[in-house]
Every structure is written in structure tokens, then in C-alpha cells.
Image: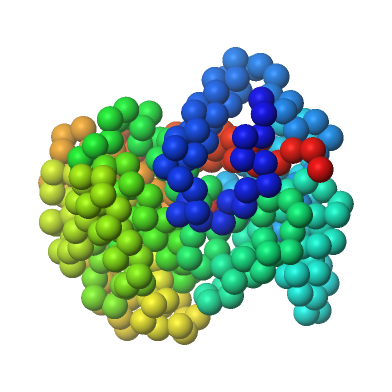
Amino acid sequence: MKPEFKGKHFITLDDWKKNEIERLLEVSKIMKQKFHNNEDTTFLKNKSAFLMFFEQSTRTRNSMEAGIAQLGGHGNYLDTSGMQISHGESAKDTAIILSSYGHGIACRNCFWKIGNKFLREMAEHSTVPVMNLQCDLYHPMQGLADLMTIQEVYPKTQNLKVSVIWAYATTHKKPISVPLTQILLFPRFGMDVTLAYPEGYDLPEWAIVKAKKYAKENNGTFTITHNIEEAFKDADVVIPKNWGSWVNNQSDAVVDELLESYKSWKCTEEMMALANKNVKYMHALPADRGNEVVDSVIDGDHSIVYQEAENRLHTAKAVMAMTMGDK
Ligand code: CP
């Protein structure tokens, strides 16, 4: 398999043309088939990827680390607290050095107003592809896996009703990168996207403008509501998930008065009953069970969260195989 997008950075799917995303999805499908058939996928023999994490991770770290091993290469897991970055070494110097040692640099940095800038600075100076493992704005690996999962269930996505819904959670102040990636990606595939959130949990205005533009260009729709029932009504896919009030309030505090006033924004059986009878429930995980969603929904027949999580492996392998290659 040729690295058709060799050297292309993977920081946001917005930098990737629709046909390029479709090609990544085709390759992800091939990776999935080969994985389940125990077929060889060593397309990146002896290649190294550096996997830098400023934050915790289960799916992203392990899909990348297992993925590069299955591609015949090696992933160096780097907890950035053990790197000289923690003493102030720059993104530029880190990128120049790591790219002189290997074939790809991947990084998770979700700090508000810092993460995406850090990745962009690395990309500017890296001679190998820089892959975003989630920043303050985007989570393209998750977006690609989400789209793959939706297409597995609904091969035709034109005018599919997909609702990205804010939900109450207290585990941590989550980034906005998952919903922001979804509202920028799904309208490009003709879906009728509804974004639902209570007052105070806005996504950036520039992203809303873009989402509307993409919906228009692709004969879909993009609607905002502050009514949770409206978002569930007749939906084919619901994605109820928490995100922090970063746009309006940059405090790191997890629980505050505003959050506590929206405890009722939860995915329950009553909400699911408003949706299409074959509705699918998705969540990037980890979920705050009992707060974002009741167990009977996430563990129930409508839930495709484990399929969605598994697809993180296949999409990660596709991105690495298509962007990394010989020096
Ligand atoms: N969905 C996701 O990115 O999971 P992790 O935080 O566990 O990597």
C-alpha cells in the first residue's frame, strides 16, 4: 500500500479534501477486514512514530500504539511530563529533533488556546507528518472513526438526521474538540445535523458559520437548538456528550453553578423514545455513566459505542499508513 498522502499533516479534517477523507475511509475499511482476517498489514516496516501525550488516554494511545505495531513499525509513547517540554523546550525544537529520529509525530494537547497552536508550530518545523491526537479545537482521529461507524450502519448519509447533543458530566472539564470536529465534518457528507446545547455552552462562532456553509454546499442542513427534546426527535443518530463552557468561561473549574443547572441534559430512555425507532447512540468515550447517559441506553440495543471505539484502531492505521513512509 502506497502512502498516498505522504508527509501530509493530520491536524484537522478541515485541511483534508472530501475525496481524501473518502480514501482514508476506504483504507480504514481494508485495515478492518485485514485485522479480522488476521492478514498482514506491515506497510510501515521499521518506521517509528512518536506519540506525545499531555493528557490521559485509553482509546487514542492504544489504537495508535497497537496500530503502528500492526503496521510493522514502532510507537514511542511519550508522557510529556517526562520530556524537556516540561522545562520549557519549544514545540519547534521538539519537532525538529523527533522528526530527525523517525517518520511521524502524533500529539495530544488539549490546553485551551494552546493545544492547536502547539501542533501547528510542530507541523511548521517537522519534516514528517504531525498527527493530532486531540487538541483544544479538533479530534480528527475521533471524527474519522465516527464517520466510518455511521457509514457502516447507514451507507447513505445524505439527509441522515444526526444530533450532536450537550450532556451533563462532572468527571472533568472536557474539550470542545469532539463536537466541533463533528459539526464541521458531518455536514460535508450531506447529513442534517442538529447541534443542541444549553445556554453558555456555545461552540466558536467561526465553526458555526463553517458548518452552515458546508451544509448548504452539500444539500444538508445545520440547525442549532437549546431544546434537548427537539434534538432527539426523529433522529437517526444521537451523540449526547459533555463539553466544557470553554468559549464563554476559561476557568478550569469542573463543576460550577451553570453546569449544575443543566443536570437534566441526560440521555435517558425517555429521550431515546423520541428518536427514530432504529436510532443509534454514539459516544467517543469515556462516558460519565449516570450523568451523561443512563446504563440501559449505553449498554442497550441502540448503542454502537464499542464499534465506534474499535474503529479508532482501523482509522488510526489508515492515517499512519497513508501519511508516513520512507524519509
Ligand atoms: N475518545 C477518545 O479520544 O478516548 P481517549 O481519551 O481514551 O483517548
Q: From where the camera sits, is residue 285 visible?
A: no
Q: Is residue 73 above or below residue 247?
A: above
In the image, what residue occupies the spot 51% across and 68% down?
136
Q: Position of residue 155 (x, y in %)?
A: 32, 28
Q: Of residues 97 and 199, which is closer to you in this image? A: 97
Q: Is residue 245 above or below residue 264?
A: below
The quadrant the C terminus occupies is top right
Q: Of residues 150 and 318, which is closer to you in this image? A: 318
Q: Position of 307 compared to 8: left or right?
A: left
In the image, what residue occupies the spot 62% across and 60% down?
108
In the image, what residue occupies the spot 45% across and 54% down?
14
Q: Which of the 4 quarters of the picture holds residue 32?
A: top right
Q: Position of 296 compared to 27: left or right?
A: left
Q: Position of residue 71 (x, y in %)?
A: 72, 31
In the image, what residue occupies the spot 46% across and 45% down?
17
Q: Position of 8 compared to 264: left or right?
A: right
